């Protein structure tokens, strides 16, 4: 028995496959692992390289040649065609210690399980990385060790700013400690936790999500980390606010109709009595006071008319209306006012707008309310510089979009949430009833449209109206 044969018997109990080959790759001897696996396939004087996957043969031949010339080991991951199927292996070419020998050892280690895990890991990574839902993985201490692209986009932070940090860096601080204590108790015990949270983006904006946290369990059933996935609830929250607002406006409309009825009749009687009193006296002081009373009655009557306009269906007939024409008329009416003389009006009106089934007088009332409010807001600025009101109309999908933007002082966030509520106004006392935008909201809704407002203090305000083209 030669030295290489004797030494090679040492490898019989190794799980990896060992082959002794000559300089051409012809198999001289195998260990028991190789014999067991290749018993039905292996024939005497077979060439090892005939089992290599065809696409890798050229490269493995090259590595084997390098081993022979350099007397150094070389490795490659490839596949062997065995028993009519492919086996993922790591192949290492090892020269004998005796450099004069023309024999070489080839070690083939089965990496099928590792390869499968690698494929599964790659598959998971691609799914996680390309998911529209923000995903994060943390270690046992809660430090983030992975975040996907959606998480980066949603939070506004870079990956470098997030990795190694605790998720509390974007917490809103609004949830009590007991809330998080319960969460930690649940996931630490190996259970899944689900809850709704409010986070803060890097720019300070709120980010509402439904958060699911699942423990990552190893083979010994130990928790090694935590997997968290967020489902964006921003649209849901917006829809809920809109629904609550619509319900509130509907309730207010019902209340307004009752108020208008109960107040309107007595007010008409008072107005008639004042007129009788005015005709029955010649006292200057009495005439002056009665005139003041009549002015206040007129103001109350205007408020009641606005309440009625909002709360009851219109008796007017819908007619196809040229939106651009109504916008131009509203702009020309607004420009006549003395407060508007130093304001530049700009109109960018699309010629592609279809005529919509509307009530021209009512939609013009909406436009006028917004424009006059913009003029009033600009006039209240202490420092004025090239003040401007811009009007734009366009078509997007199945909607006509109209925007009114001004360079006024803007509206605070607190007031912005109440802008369409009745009797709410930011104007000085006696300068407005606070019903204009409320009535405008009702008119737009009656046409199945939407009206929204966005504003920043010191930057101005923009009103956006969406009217459906296929109005039923």
Image (spheres, helix red, strand yellow):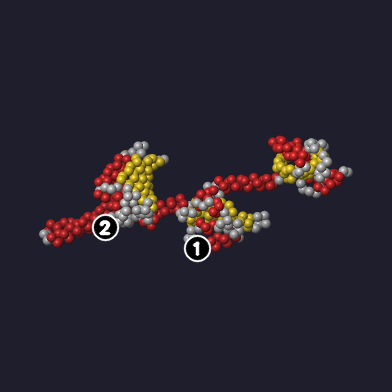
* Relative side of 138 to 339, left or right: right
Q: Which quadrant is home to the N terminus?
A: top right
Residue 135 visible in this rendered orientation of the protein: no
Tell me the crowding category of disc 1: few under 14, some 14 to 19, or many 20 or more residues within 10 angstroms, Cα based: few
Going from the N terminus, do you reach mark 2 or mark 1 first? 1
Specify few, some or many for label 2: CA neighbours under 10 Å numbering under 14, 14-19, or 20 or more: few
307 relative to 205 in the view: left or right: left
Local secondary structure at mark 1? loop
| 78 or 300: nearer the viewer | 78
Q: Name the residue: 49% across, 60% down.
A: 173
For the C terminus, the quadrant is: top left
Mark pair 2, 1: CA separation: 44 Å
* Pair 2/1: label in front: 2
- Residue name at image x 82 percent, y 37 percent: 44
Regarding residue 242, the answer to whether it shows in the image is yes
Residue sitting at the far right:
1
Q: Position of residue 433 (x, y in %)?
A: 28, 55
Residue 355, image x and y in percent? 33, 38
Identity of the residue drawn at 63% across and 57% down = 224
- Residue 430 marker: 2
Q: Position of residue 468 (x, y in %)?
A: 38, 42
Residue found at the far left of this picture: 282
Camera-nearest residue between 240 and 155: 155
Quarter-of-image position of residue 350: top left
| Residue sitting at x 30%, y 40% | 325
- Between 344 and 335, which is closer to the camera in this rendering? 344
**Residue 405 has which mark?**
none
The numbered disc on residue 176 is 1
């Amino acid at each position: 028995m030669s030295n290489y044969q004797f030494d090679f018997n040492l490898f019989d109990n190794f799980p990896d496959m060992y082959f002794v080959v000559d300089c051409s790759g012809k198999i001289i001897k195998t260990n028991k692992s190789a014999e067991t696996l290749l018993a039905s396939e292996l024939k005497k004087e077979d060439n090892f390289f005939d089992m290599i996957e065809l696409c890798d043969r050229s490269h493995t031949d090259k590595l084997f040649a390098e081993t022979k010339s350099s007397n150094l080991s070389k490795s490659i991951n490839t596949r062997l065609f065995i028993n009519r199927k492919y086996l993922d292996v790591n192949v290492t070419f090892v020269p004998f210690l005796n450099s004069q020998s023309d024999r070489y050892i080839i070690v083939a280690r089965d990496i099928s399980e590792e390869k499968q895990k690698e494929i599964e890991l790659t598959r998971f990574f691609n799914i996680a990385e390309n998911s529209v839902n923000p995903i994060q993985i943390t270690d046992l201490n809660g430090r983030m060790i992975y975040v996907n692209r959606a998480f980066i986009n949603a939070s506004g932070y870079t990956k470098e700013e997030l990795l190694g940090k605790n998720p509390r860096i974007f917490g809103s601080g609004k949830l009590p400690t007991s809330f998080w204590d319960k969460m930690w108790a649940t996931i630490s015990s190996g259970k899944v936790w689900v809850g709704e949270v409010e986070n803060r983006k890097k720019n300070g904006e709120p980010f509402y999500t439904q958060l699911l946290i699942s423990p990552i369990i190893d083979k010994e059933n130990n928790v090694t980390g935590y997997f968290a996935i967020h489902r964006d609830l921003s649209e849901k929250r917006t829809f809920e606010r809109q629904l609550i607002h619509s319900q509130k406006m509907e309730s207010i409309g019902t209340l307004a109709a009752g108020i208008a009825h109960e107040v309107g009749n007595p007010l008409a009687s008072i107005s008639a009595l004042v007129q009788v009193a005015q005709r029955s006296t010649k006292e200057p002081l009495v005439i002056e006071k009665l005139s003041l009373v009549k002015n206040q009655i007129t103001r109350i009557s205007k408020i009641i008319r606005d309440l009625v306009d909002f709360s009851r269906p219109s008796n007017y007939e819908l007619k196809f209306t040229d939106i651009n024409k109504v916008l131009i008329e509203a702009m020309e009416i607004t420009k006549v006012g003395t407060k508007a003389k130093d304001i530049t009006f700009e109109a960018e009106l699309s010629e592609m707008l279809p005529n919509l089934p509307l009530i021209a007088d009512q939609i013009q009332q909406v436009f006028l309310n917004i424009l006059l409010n913009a003029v009033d807001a600009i006039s209240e600025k202490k420092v004025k510089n090239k003040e401007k009101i811009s009007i734009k109309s366009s078509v997007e999908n199945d909607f006509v979009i109209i925007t009114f933007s001004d360079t006024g002082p803007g509206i605070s966030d607190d007031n912005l949430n109440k802008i369409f509520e009745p009797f709410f106004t930011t104007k000085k006392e006696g300068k407005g009833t606070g019903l204009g935008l409320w009535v405008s909201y009702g008119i737009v809704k009656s046409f199945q449209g939407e009206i929204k407002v966005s504003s920043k203090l010191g930057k101005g305000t923009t009103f956006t109206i969406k009217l459906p083209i296929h109005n039923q």
